Amino acid sequence: MKKVVVQALVSCAIFVMVLFGFAQIDWLSVLSLNDGLLEKKLGDMYWSYYMQQGDYIEDDELLLPIDSLVNHICEANGIEREEIKLHLLKTENVNAFALPDNHLVIHTALVLECKNEMELCGVLAHEIAHMQKGHVMRKLTKAVGLSFLLNVVGGNSSEAIAQTLHLLSSTAYDRSLESEADATAVDYLMNAGIDPEPFADFLLRLDKEENMPGFMVWVSTHPDSKARSEKVIDLSRRGHKAYKQVLNIEEWKKLKADISVAEESF
């Protein structure tokens, strides 16, 4: 009897160890799905869902200044600009987020909240970092599992698409991934000759205004803004250099004015 109990305990221990081991495996990397078909299909499905809602802005001329900021960051850091799909959503919520397959989504309210181009560049660099580091698919896989994502693609269920899309647009990354994205963003900005400290100012300002309705989404997806702001300042001061503007003051003012007009036209 004692032998049977010992064997049972050993079997349970082995099962738990194997289960834990499988849970630690990065299945996206093992199955080569991070940059493959699954991510592309998910990205297409998620953006198609947004297009059906009709709240996106398709004006190329309006997007041009933001696009020039993205171009500048990418060129300075050896990032393939053509891989990034830039989108602007008309909404009162201050937010920006990345979707699978390098879809970068910016809310009009976020652009209007930024006091200068450097603050906006900080947000852009942060989201580009999430994409370049593979955080988007890691977040999805950890939250719902690979099999669920495969079912989303195979079943094309609008409910499942909306559910997983909510995870990307309205919930936070792990703290370690946010820290990595912040640190990478600072590197991107400094390589591009853009001052990172206004990005820290932006984070700190949102921390102080976190109870205002328009900021709730950003705060929920980017917690610990005050601590992150302090870290960004610390990192930026380790490699100070001469900074420059990408847009001139008139171009920046025109961008915000055009977005205000576009919001009113919806």
Image: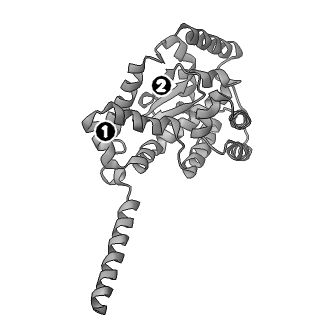
The residue sitting at 67% across, 25% down in the picture is 114
In the figure, residue 237 lies in which quadrant?
A: top right
* Placement of 153 over or under 53, stated as above or below: below
Give whichever of discs 1 and 2 has the lower sequence position.
2
- Residue 252 locus on image (x, y percent): 66, 17
Label 2 sits on what residue type?
Leu
- Residue 89 locus on image (x, y percent): 51, 21
**Which residue occupies the extreme left position in the image?**
154
In the figure, residue 165 lies in which quadrant?
A: top left
Q: Residues within 10 Å of mark 2 (few under 14, many from 20)?
A: some
The residue sitting at 42% across, 20% down in the picture is 53
Q: Name the image quarter holding the N terminus.
A: bottom left
* Placement of 45 over or under 265, stated as above or below: below
**Which residue occupies the extreme front position in the image?**
1
Can residue 9 be seen here? The reply is yes
Looking at the picture, the colour scheme in use is one colour
In the figure, residue 239 lies in which quadrant?
A: top right
Label 1 sits on what residue type?
Val
Tag 1 and tag 2, C-beta contact below 8 Å: no
Front position among marks 1 and 2? 1
On the picture, is 72 further left or further right than 201?
left
Q: Badge 2 is on which residue?
A: 86
- Residue 225 locus on image (x, y percent): 67, 42
The residue sitting at 64% across, 23% down in the picture is 246
Q: CA distance from mark 1 to mark 2?
A: 23 Å
- Residue 140 locus on image (x, y percent): 42, 44
Decide which of 188, 57 is in the foreground and name it: 57
Decide which of 22, 32 is in the foreground and name it: 22
**Which residue occupies the extreme bottom position in the image?**
2
- Which disc number belongs to residue 192? none
- Which disc number belongs to residue 152? 1
